C-alpha cells in the first residue's frame, strides 16, 4: 500500500463540490483476508445543493475502458450537469486506474515474474469491480441501492452487477455497453472488422482527399522508419489504429484535421511532420492506460479458453486490412478501432516491459463467467440502455440479443450519436432517465 498522504478531502469548483473517498478492498474477493488494494472515488455534488439536507440519492458512474480512471470534472457540463440536477454522483477509479492502487510498467514488477503479474491482473475484471462497488455502497449509502450509469465497458460491468449483486442497484442506465452474453473474443472481432471497414469508407466519403493521404502515409511508413516524439515506432499497422477516432461523434473530423498536415518537406525529402507525430502519439499512446492493452481481450473471456491475441489472429481473416498490400493494389487503407495486438508491446516504449505479462494473459485459461444469463432472465431491476446503431466498439446485434435476454430491459436504439454519445451534453442521460421512469 502507498504511504502517500491524501490531499484535502473537499475542494470547490465553479458549480461543484468535490469530495475524496478512499476505500480498502481485497485484491481477491474470494480471499478477503489476503492482500488489500486502495480504491479511490470522487463524490460530486452541485454547489447549490446540500447532499445530506436535500436527501440526494447516489448515482455511481462506471467508466469505459478497461483501464481508464473516471472522468475528472471541470465545472458542471455534459452528462454530469444533468445528473447533478437530482443525484450526488460517485466517480469511481476502477481498480488499477487513476488514484486507485496503480497497475503499470512501473508498479507491476513489484508483483514478481510476468506470470505472477498476470495472475495478479486476473483479479481486475468486471466481476471484481462489481464486488468493489458493493463494499463501497455499504459504506456510503447505508445499504440503500443506488442508480448505476455504465458507459461502454462500464455498461459491461453494469450487466455483471445485475448478474451477481442486483440488490445493490435501484436503476441501471447503460450507454454503448450492452455486451454479448456469450460472444467470445473471436466472435467480437469477426463482427468488428466489417464495422471498421464501413466506418473507414464513410470517412473517405466525407473527406475524399484523406484516402490519398492515408495511402501516402502507409507507403512512406513501409519504406521509412518513423519514431514519434514519445519514442513509439509508427508502423503501417500502428497508423491504422487511428481509426479509434471514428468511434466518437467528432472523430471523423479530428482524423481529417490530423491527416491534413501529415507531411513536411525536409532536406531528406518528405517526412512526417512533428506536429502530426505529436498528435498521433497522443491518440495511440497507452503509457497512462496500460490495462487497456493488457486486459482488453479478457473482458470477453468467460468459457475457460485463452483469448490468444484474438484481434490479431482474426485480422488475418480480413486481408483488406493489410495496408501495404492495399496501397500496392490501389485499394483504400482501412483503419482499425480498439483492437489490441502483440506488436504494440514492441512499438510503444511504455508497454515494452509488459510484453511477457501481456503474453501470459493472452495464454491464460480458466476465465470464469462474467454474466449469469438465468438470473438476468429473472431480472426485476429497472434497466434501460442506449444502443448506438453501428457502434464501432460494441456490436449492435450482440447488444440487441442481450437486451432481449435481460427481463424488462428497455432500449433506445439510435444512430444520432456515436459510442461517446453520453458526453453530448445531458441529452442521452435525460432520455434514459425518462425511459426508466416511464417503464
Image: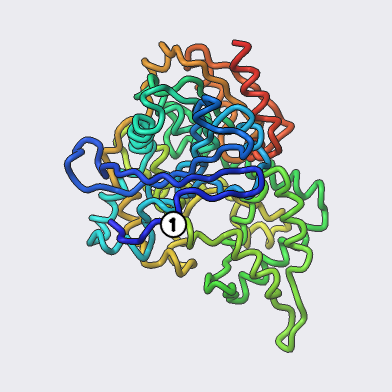
Residue at 41%, 11% in the rendered image: 378
Say which of 75 and 367 sits in front: 75
Q: Is residue 29 visible to the viewer in this orientation of the structure?
A: yes
Horizontally, residue 290 falls left or right of residue 428, namely left
How many circles with numbers are drawn on the protein?
Answer: 1
Image x and y of residue 353, in percent: 36, 67
- Furthest-front residue in this view: 53
Image x and y of residue 72, in percent: 56, 49
Task: Identify residue for label 1.
Answer: 7
Say which of 348 and 98 sits in front: 98
Q: In the rendered image of this protein, does residue 143 appear above or below residue 348?
A: above
In which quadrant of the rendered image does the N terminus lie?
bottom left
Horizontally, residue 242 falls left or right of residue 51, namely right
Which quadrant of the view contains residue 422? top right
Image x and y of residue 296, in percent: 44, 46
- SS at mark 1? loop
Image x and y of residue 172, in percent: 51, 24
Residue at 35%, 37% in the rendered image: 132
Residue at 27%, 45% in the rendered image: 27
Q: Is residue 316 visible to the viewer in this orientation of the structure?
A: no
Question: Dot 1, crowdedness within 10 Å: few (<14), some or many (≥20)?
Answer: few
- Furthest-left residue in this view: 33
Residue at 38%, 60% in the rendered image: 104
Q: How is the image coloured?
A: rainbow
Which quadrant of the view contains residue 125? top left
In which quadrant of the rendered image does the C terminus lie?
top right
Amino acid at each position: 500500500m502507498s504511504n502517500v498522504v491524501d490531499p484535502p478531502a473537499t475542494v470547490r469548483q465553479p458549480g461543484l463540490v468535490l469530495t475524496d473517498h478512499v476505500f480498502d478492498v481485497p485484491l481477491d474477493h474470494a480471499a478477503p483476508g489476503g492482500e488489500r488494494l486502495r480504491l479511490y472515488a470522487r463524490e460530486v455534488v452541485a454547489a447549490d445543493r446540500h447532499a445530506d439536507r436535500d436527501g440526494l440519492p447516489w448515482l455511481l458512474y462506471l467508466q469505459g475502458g478497461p483501464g481508464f480512471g473516471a472522468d475528472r470534472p471541470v465545472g458542471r457540463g455534459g452528462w454530469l450537469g444533468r445528473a447533478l440536477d437530482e443525484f450526488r454522483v460517485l466517480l469511481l477509479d476502477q481498480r488499477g486506474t487513476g488514484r486507485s492502487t496503480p497497475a503499470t510498467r512501473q508498479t507491476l514488477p513489484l508483483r514478481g515474474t510476468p506470470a505472477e503479474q498476470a495472475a495478479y491482473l486476473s483479479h481486475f475484471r468486471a466481476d471484481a469491480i462489481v464486488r468493489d462497488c458493493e463494499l463501497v455502497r455499504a459504506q456510503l449509502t447505508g445499504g440503500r441501492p443506488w442508480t448505476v450509469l455504465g458507459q461502454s465497458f462500464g455498461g459491461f460491468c453494469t450487466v455483471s452487477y445485475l448478474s451477481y449483486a442486483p440488490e445493490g442497484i435501484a436503476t441501471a442506465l447503460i450507454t454503448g455497453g450492452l455486451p454479448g452474453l456469450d460472444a467470445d473474443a473471436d466472435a467480437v472481432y469477426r463482427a468488428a472488422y466489417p464495422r471498421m471497414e464501413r466506418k473507414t469508407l464513410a470517412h473517405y466519403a466525407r473527406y475524399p482527399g484523406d484516402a490519398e493521404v492515408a495511402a501516402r502515409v502507409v507507403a512512406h511508413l513501409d519504406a521509412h522508419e518513423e519514431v514519434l516524439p514519445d519514442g513509439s515506432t509508427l508502423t503501417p499497422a500502428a497508423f491504422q489504429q487511428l481509426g479509434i477516432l471514428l468511434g466518437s461523434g467528432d472523430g471523423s473530423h479530428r482524423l481529417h484535421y490530423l491527416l491534413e498536415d501529415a507531411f513536411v518537406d525536409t532536406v531528406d525529402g518528405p517526412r512526417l511532420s512533428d506536429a502530426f507525430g505529436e498528435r498521433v502519439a497522443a491518440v495511440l499512446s497507452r503509457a497512462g492506460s496500460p490495462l487497456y492493452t493488457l486486459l482488453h481481450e479478457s473482458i470477453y473471456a468467460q468459457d475457460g479458453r485463452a483469448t490468444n491475441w484474438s484481434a490479431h489472429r482474426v485480422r488475418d481473416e480480413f486481408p483488406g486490412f493489410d495496408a501495404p498490400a492495399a496501397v500496392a493494389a490501389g485499394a483504400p487503407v482501412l483503419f482499425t478501432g480498439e483492437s489490441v495486438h502483440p506488436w504494440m508491446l514492441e512499438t510503444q516504449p511504455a508497454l515494452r516491459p509488459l510484453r511477457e505479462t501481456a503474453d501470459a494473459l493472452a495464454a491464460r485459461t480458466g476465465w470464469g463467467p462474467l454474466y449469469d444469463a438465468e438470473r438476468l432472465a429473472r431480472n426485476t431491476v429497472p434497466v434501460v440502455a442506449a444502443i448506438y446503431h453501428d457502434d464501432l466498439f460494441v456490436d449492435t446485434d450482440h447488444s440487441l440479443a442481450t437486451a432481449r435476454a435481460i427481463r424488462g430491459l428497455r432500449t433506445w436504439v439510435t444512430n444520432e450519436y456515436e459510442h461517446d454519445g453520453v458526453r453530448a451534453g445531458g441529452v442521452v442521460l435525460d432520455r434514459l432517465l425518462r425511459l426508466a421512469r416511464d417503464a
